[in-house]
Amino acid sequence: MFKRSVMLAVVLAGVSLSFTASAAESVVTNKPVAPAADIQGKGIVKKIDSAAGNVNIAHEAIAALQWPAMTMDFKVSDRKLLANLQAGQSIVFVLGKDPVVGYVITRIEPVK
């Protein structure tokens, strides 16, 4: 029983240490880990839900995420981004990674 407890403590400590180290710096190079790059997409606005902070977009394939073209809801990082959007509008957008929600739109603009 004692061996299992010690082994479990060592494993958990290692997991905790690896998460802490990877969040701040690379253990191998001892350099800061760069945040993930913003990911761009193109699509057509299908529906806007300002109250929920969502926009439904029929988007082209997003190679950086290996996503095929599809229609889906996205949360926005700031509801103000939805102010000038209209259904049917062609747009370009940038996704950022939110630790709780997942991918959210951080920038959105009409295609000119």
Image: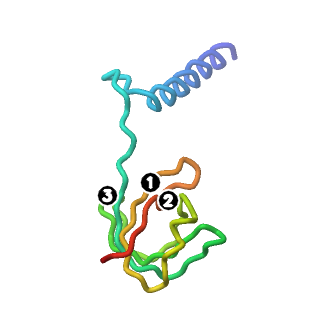
The amino acid pointed to by label 1 is Gly
Does dot 3 land on a helix, a strand or a loop?
helix
Q: Nearer the viewer, residue 5 or 89?
A: 89
Q: Quadrant of residue 1?
A: top right
Residue designated by label 3:
64
At a point 50% along the width and 59% down the height, the residue shown is: 104
Q: Nearer the viewer, residue 52 or 5?
A: 52
Seen in the picture, residue 35 relative to 79 is either above or below; the reply is: above
Alpha carbons under labels 2 and 3: distance apart: 15 Å
Q: Which three-letter amino acid code belongs to the residue tagged 3?
A: Ala
Residue at the spot of label 1: 96
N-term-proximal mark, 2 vs 3: 3
Q: Amino acid at mark 2?
A: Val
Residue ranking furthest to the right: 1
Q: Which residue is mark 2?
A: 104
Please state the total of marks drawn on the protein image: 3
Q: Quadrant of residue 34?
A: top left
- Tell me what residue is drawn at x 46 percent, y 25 percent: 21
Q: Callout 1 environment at 10 Å: few (<14), some (14 to 19), or many (20+)?
A: some
**Of callouts 1 and 2, which one flags the residue occurring earlier in the amino acid sequence?**
1
Q: Are marks 1 and 2 in contact (CB under 8 Å)?
A: yes
The disc, 1 or 3, on the residue closer to the chain's N-terminal end is 3
Colouring used for the render: rainbow
